[in-house]
Amino acid sequence: MLASAMTKTVSDPIQLIYAGGTFGSYGRPLAPLSAEVFLPTLKKLLLEQDNAANLPNISWLDNPLIKDSSQLTPSDFIHFYQLLLTAYAQGDKRFVLITGTDTLSYLGAFLAEAFAGSDICVVLTASMRPLLDSEVLNSYCIDTHSDAWDNLNDSLKLAAAGESGVKIGFGGESWPAQTVQKIHSHDLMAFTGHFRAAYPANSYIKNLPDIRRQHWLDDQKKALSSIQTRAEHARIHAIYCLPNDAKVINNQLTALLSQPPCGIILLGFGSGNVPYSAALAETLELAHKEGHMVICASQCPFGGVSDSYAAGSWQYNHHVITGGRLTIPAIYARLLWLLLRYDSPARRRQRWLNNSNQAGTSIKKR
C-alpha cells in the first residue's frame, strides 16, 4: 500500500539500492556475492571511506531482487518501479540504484518514462569491473583498478544535489537516462549519452507542490495492479533489416501478428530505410489493425531516423511510427511503459505521438 508523501529535506539520507551485476562480483571465477555478504561489506567500506570522500548521508533500501542484469524481464522492471514508488510515496526523493551494465540503459530509460511528471531524483550506475579485488582472497578490499568505487561516489554526489529526473552516472559523466547507450563491451568508458533530451526528461518538476505530487501518486497507485499483471505478458520484438529480399522482413513481421498487441522495433538502415514491397506494406497495415505498435529505429548508434529518403518514408504511410532520435533502449522503454500503462492500442499510439510532439521528432503522414 502506498502511503501519502511526507515532506522531507535535502538533509535526509540518499536511499541506496543494490541490484547485482559486475559491481558485486568476486572470486575466481567471478561470481556475484550474495546480498547477505556483499551489502555488509559495502556498508563497511563506505563508512571507512566516508570522511575522505566527503560522501552524503546514506540509507539502504531493501531489495530482494538481485540478479545479473542480462536476465531482467518486464516484471523485474516493474519490481524496481514499485520499490522506488513506495519509497517516494513515503517522502524519499533521492535514490542511487546499482545494477549491471547489460540492461543499465534499458532500465534507466524505463524508469524515466514511468516517473515522468514527478520530482523524484534517481541515479543509476554500474561498473565494468568488480568493486572488490579478487587477488585478495582472505579479505574484502577495493580493487584500485576498478571503476566501481568512482562510479558509486560520483552517483551519490549527483543524487545529493537532488535535481529531479532519472539519470545514469558512469565513467565520470552523467546523462538523462533516455539518451544513454552502451557503446563498448569491455572498456571502462562503456557508455555515452547527451543532454539534448526532450520528453520524459523535460517533464520533471523541480519543486512539485504537495497536492500535485499526491495527485500524481494517486494516479500511479490506481494503475499499479494492472501494470503488474500486464508486465507478465508484455512483449517487445525487434526486426533487424539486413540486405535480404523484403520477403524476409515480411515473414518475420507476419509471424508476430498472431500474438496479442505488442511493440515491434523495426531497425532500418541509415536514417530508417526499409526494403519496400507491396506485401510488406499490406502487412504493416494489418499490424496496425491488430493493435501492434511498429516503431522505426536506425541501426546507427547516433542520428536517429528521418523521412528524407523515399526508401524510408514509405513506411510512415502505413502506420509505422518514427523513433526520431531516441536510442533503441529508449524506444524499448517507451513501448514497454505504454503497453503496461494504457489499456488500448489507440491510447498507446496517442501517447507516443503526443510525447514525440513534445520532443519535436514526429514525422507527419504523407
Image (cartoon, rainbow, N blue to C red):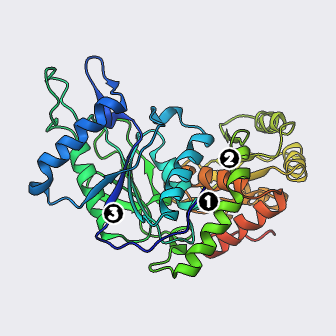
Residue beneath the point at 79% across and 58% down: 314
Which numbered marker is on residue 133?
A: none
Q: Amino acid at mark 1?
A: Val
- Above-or-below relation of 81 to 136: below
Q: What whole-number distance in Å separates the C-alpha atoms at marks 2 and 3?
A: 28 Å
* Left or right of 131, for residue 264: right
Residue beneath the point at 50% across and 79% down: 208
- Secondary element at tag 2: helix
Closer to the camera, 361 or 105? 105
- Above-or-below relation of 5 to 13: below
Which mark is first along the chain, 2 or 1?
A: 2
> Disc 2 marks which residue?
228
Q: Quadrant of the N terminus?
A: bottom right
Which mark is first along the chain, 3 or 1?
A: 3
Residue 76: x percent and y percent?
57, 41
Q: Residues within 10 Å of mark 1 (few under 14, many from 20)?
A: many
- Secondary element at tag 1: loop
> Disc 1 marks which residue?
305
Q: What whole-number distance in Å separates the C-alpha atoms at marks 1 and 3?
A: 33 Å
> Disc 3 marks which residue?
159
Q: What whole-number distance in Å separates the C-alpha atoms at marks 1 and 2?
A: 32 Å
* Left or right of 207, for residue 110: right
Q: Amino acid at mark 3?
A: Ala
Q: Residues within 10 Å of mark 3 (few under 14, many from 20)?
A: many
Confirm whether residue 147 shows in the render: no
Which mark is first along the chain, 3 or 2?
A: 3
Q: Are marks 1 and 3 in contact (CB under 8 Å)?
A: no
Q: Amino acid at mark 2?
A: Gln
Residue 81: x percent and y percent?
55, 52
